[in-house]
Amino acid sequence: MDLEKILPANGPSINEVKKYIEKYSDEIIVIKCGGSVLLDNNLFKQFIEDMSIINKLGLSTIVVHGGGKNIKRKLDNLNIESKFIDGLRVTNEKTIKIVEEALLELNTEIINDLRNLQVNAQSVAPQKNNVIKIKPERQELGYVGSPKEINSSTLLEIIKERKIPVIIPMGIGDDKKIYNINADIAAGSIAKELNSRRLLLMTDVEGVLDRDKNLISEINSTVAEKMLEDGDISGGMIPKINTCLDAVNNGVTGVVIVDGRKPHSILFELFSDKGAGTLIRKWKNLKISKTFYLT
């Protein structure tokens, strides 16, 4: 394998990639793509390129994509107000159709762009090959659910065929209706079911910040839980951190909140010492320095 031809000039070094690539062989990496990555043409192009590179390196990946800003844009065009409760979108019978439409459009775009780079990818959507059975969330949220069961065999079969599953974060309930799922929560549930080595949550922030707004490069689950309790984490970061905690407490080795605005952030997170966000693990003995939020 000629890494010099595969890797981008402004990505991690060849030596770094060699150091880490064996770590992820025979492992599954789940990547949730969202935020500006799905709206900024340059970031989106780099995301597709990074997925192509990871595929050429022989690693097994699953993509779960969000679509929050795309959904908001569609709703705004129809003069429909977006409402959130604890970071989760309120979705009524009218908006669920718009959400579904926006996510299908994004899914098709991701699939087509990957195929243009000779990467085999397969759409996973509730309309044709649903893999997520859901239970409804609180009634006030409407058509919003959380995963109850993941059909891992379908995903593993796609991966076995050397394809990348590209998953729409929606599922079907016992009532046979389609429900919206927070993409972070969907990705976390899939990572748990498959005992993934890494779960990457791409977002529009640096990662988890301390009270001085400095990036925390790594924390354990105990510290993250304390930050939630103390209200140092709010809004859309709440479901992200809850997903991280649920994942690391249920078999996922590590979860990273990745700054998707950084060039080649996925490659730097997987194949470099410095990473590209905040790594959360279950460690109980991680030392807490003065830069951490607890000071």
Image: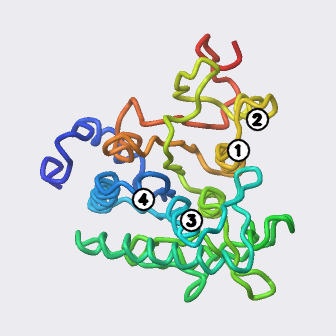
Say which quarter of the image contains residue 182. Answer: bottom right
Outermost residue to the right:
139
Q: Quadrant of the N terminus?
A: bottom left
Q: Tell how many labels.
A: 4
The residue identified by callout 2 is 228
The residue identified by callout 4 is 38
Of the numbered discs in the image, which one, if any, rests on residue 238? 1
CB-based contact (under 8 Å), mark 1 and mark 2: yes
CB-based contact (under 8 Å), mark 4 and mark 3: no
Query: Residue 235: x percent and y percent?
Result: 69, 44
- Label 3 or label 1, whichever lies nearer to me, is 3
The span from disc 1 to disc 2 (Cα, nearest Å) is: 7 Å
Query: Residue 162: x percent and y percent?
Result: 36, 73
Say which quarter of the image contains residue 220. Answer: top right
Which badge, 2 or 3, is on the more N-terminal residue?
3
The span from disc 4 to disc 1 (Cα, nearest Å) is: 21 Å
Query: Residue 278: x percent and y percent?
Result: 53, 34
Name the residue at 54% across, 42% down.
Answer: 257
Query: Residue 104: x percent and y percent?
Result: 49, 78
Answer few, some or many: residues within 10 Å of disc 1's Cα (few below 14, many 20 plus, some between 14 and 19): some
The span from disc 4 to disc 3 (Cα, nearest Å) is: 17 Å
- Secondary structure found at label 3: helix
Say which quarter of the image contains residue 295. Answer: top right
- Secondary structure found at label 1: helix
CB-based contact (under 8 Å), mark 4 and mark 2: no
Which badge, 4 or 2, is on the more N-terminal residue?
4
Amino acid under disc 3: Asp
